[in-house]
């Protein structure tokens, strides 16, 4: 006889998987540009500055999408917000595929950026609020796994379509397929019980809790959620109240270090980096980049396994130490003149080790942490603010990477990222809490107590 608890677990996994398709689109639409831009640059004879603008268009859209959609997630709900992003992903992918000029392509990539800006925090927020606390870390990090899967799929698509100059259109257009699947899937998924309680829809919230294996404790969970609510309507001013500021500081700080340590220079410019390292053709450079995506996926699986066992902070320390070391070695490799032979492979190995270290630390933990540490009443807006910061830092790094390599040299740029990784380790030690095993309500209660977010559980 089949165990009912197993059925409920299966349901929550299916819900999390469908919602995490937003992460797949996030990864695909950010990663696909790394290969496509090589052919777009050749076809339209673009300068480095214009290349940076094409790459950064999606990031500008993500900043704006994140900024304006925190209130949307609170007003329309988490599920409907993801549905809207699925529509934007579909339209943006099709528009990019048929773009007749660079301005039109930039506009369509900007629309995709709007979708990414919303999805990048609404998807983990949705999964966090609908998941039981004992598997919340793993399920929220499923979104990060799907981001990495989207990236590696984009690299494989780029590699398979490198036979002609117009194949970049197919690279963009194929992104419409998972977008349609996400749209159809989200139509049938439930809203999160926490959002339903905020709307006074108690019976619907109980039904969702029952469907996800928490029906026996539904009344208690709804009571705990209700305690964190107020009759007042949430406003932006409340997000900046003194007792919430430590959580804001942690979220924005992690956003800074996730981007300022160079991850998206690898994601967006990996083939370019490998060409710097001496891999002569676009096709060979893109093939080497596929290895980056595969390592990213495999190590994200390791992170999912460890997050609810080892905890968040130990993984941050381990991963960020590895990032600093690999960036330092990568800088040394590029500091040598005429990269060839062994030095080429040292550069490749450093990139792979960096990606592995990022994938078990800052990659999933930033998105998980901002889905955990903010109070329910301001969670949508606060996560929106942290996500805006994340995409703002992302855009700044991506838009200046090629310029930095011209000004500081390739070695100097990677050494700068390594130094920032060391600073990030100190930040995590001083300010970041360990949230493993705590319910969202317990985290909020501790934050409200004023004891210091870092001292959670101590």
Image (tube, rainbow, N blue to C red):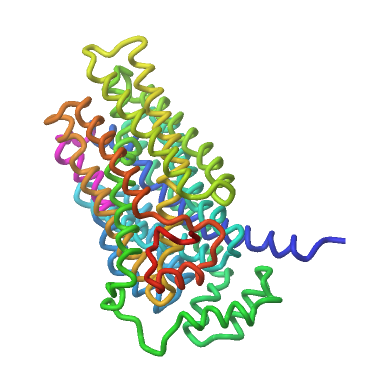
Q: Which residues are magenta?
A: 43-59
Residue in the picture at 25% in, 50% down: 393
Is residue 46 within the magenta segment? yes
Secondary structure character of the magenta stretch overall: helix
Looking at this view, is 95 or 365 the one in front? 365
**For residue 61, side relative to residue 75 (left or right):** left
The reply to whether residue 301 is in sight is: yes
Q: Is residue 249 above or below residue 333?
A: below
Looking at this view, is 70 or 366 the one in front? 366
Residue furthest toward the bottom? 231
Residue in the picture at 26% in, 78% down: 237
Is residue 134 within the magenta segment? no
Residue 126 position in % (x across, y down): 49, 66
Residue 73 sits in quarter: bottom left
Residue 14 sits in quarter: bottom right
**For residue 448, side relative to residue 304 (left or right):** left
How many numbered marks appear?
0
Looking at this view, is 281 or 411 the one in front? 411
């Amino acid at each position: 006889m089949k165990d009912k608890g197993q059925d409920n677990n299966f349901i929550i996994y299916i819900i999390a998987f469908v919602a995490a398709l937003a992460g797949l689109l996030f990864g695909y639409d950010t990663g696909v540009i790394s290969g496509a831009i090589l052919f777009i640059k050749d076809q339209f004879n673009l300068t480095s500055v214009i290349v940076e603008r094409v790459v950064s268009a999606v990031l500008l859209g993500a900043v704006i999408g994140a900024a304006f959609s925190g209130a949307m997630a609170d007003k329309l709900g988490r599920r409907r917000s993801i549905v809207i992003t699925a529509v934007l992903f579909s339209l943006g992918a099709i528009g990019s595929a048929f773009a007749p000029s660079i301005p039109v392509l930039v506009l369509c990539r900007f629309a995709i950026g709007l979708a990414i800006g919303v999805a990048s925090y609404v998807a983990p927020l949705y999964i966090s609020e609908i998941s039981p606390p004992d598997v919340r870390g793993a399920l929220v990090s499923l979104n990060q796994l799907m981001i990495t899967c989207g990236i590696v799929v984009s690299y494989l698509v780029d590699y398979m379509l490198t036979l002609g100059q117009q194949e970049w259109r197919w690279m963009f257009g194929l992104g419409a397929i998972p977008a349609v699947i996400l749209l159809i899937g989200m139509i049938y998924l439930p809203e999160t019980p926490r959002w339903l309680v905020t709307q006074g829809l108690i019976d619907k919230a109980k039904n969702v809790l029952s469907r996800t294996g928490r029906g026996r404790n539904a009344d208690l969970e709804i009571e705990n959620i209700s305690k964190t609510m107020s009759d007042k309507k949430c406003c932006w001013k409340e997000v900046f109240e003194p007792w919430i500021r430590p959580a804001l500081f942690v979220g924005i700080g992690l956003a800074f270090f996730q981007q300022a340590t160079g991850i998206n220079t690898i994601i967006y410019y990996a083939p370019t980096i490998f060409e710097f390292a001496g891999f002569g053709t676009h096709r060979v450079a893109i093939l080497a980049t596929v290895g980056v995506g595969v390592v990213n996926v495999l190590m994200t699986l390791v992170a999912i396994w460890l997050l609810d066992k080892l905890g968040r902070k130990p993984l941050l320390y381990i991963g960020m130490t590895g990032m600093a070391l690999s960036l330092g070695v990568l800088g040394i490799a590029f500091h040598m003149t005429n990269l060839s032979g062994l030095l080429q492979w040292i550069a490749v190995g450093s990139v792979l080790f960096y990606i592995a270290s990022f994938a078990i630390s800052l990659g999933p933990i930033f998105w998980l942490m901002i889905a955990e540490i903010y109070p329910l009443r301001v969670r949508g807006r606060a996560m929106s603010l942290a996500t805006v910061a994340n995409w703002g830092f992302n855009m700044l790094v991506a838009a200046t990477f090629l310029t930095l390599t011209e000004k500081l040299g390739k070695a100097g740029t990677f050494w700068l990222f390594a130094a920032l990784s060391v600073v990030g380790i100190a930040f995590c030690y001083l300010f970041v809490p360990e949230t493993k095993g705590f319910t969202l309500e317990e985290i909020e209660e501790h934050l409200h107590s004023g004891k210091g977010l870092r001292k959670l559980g101590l």
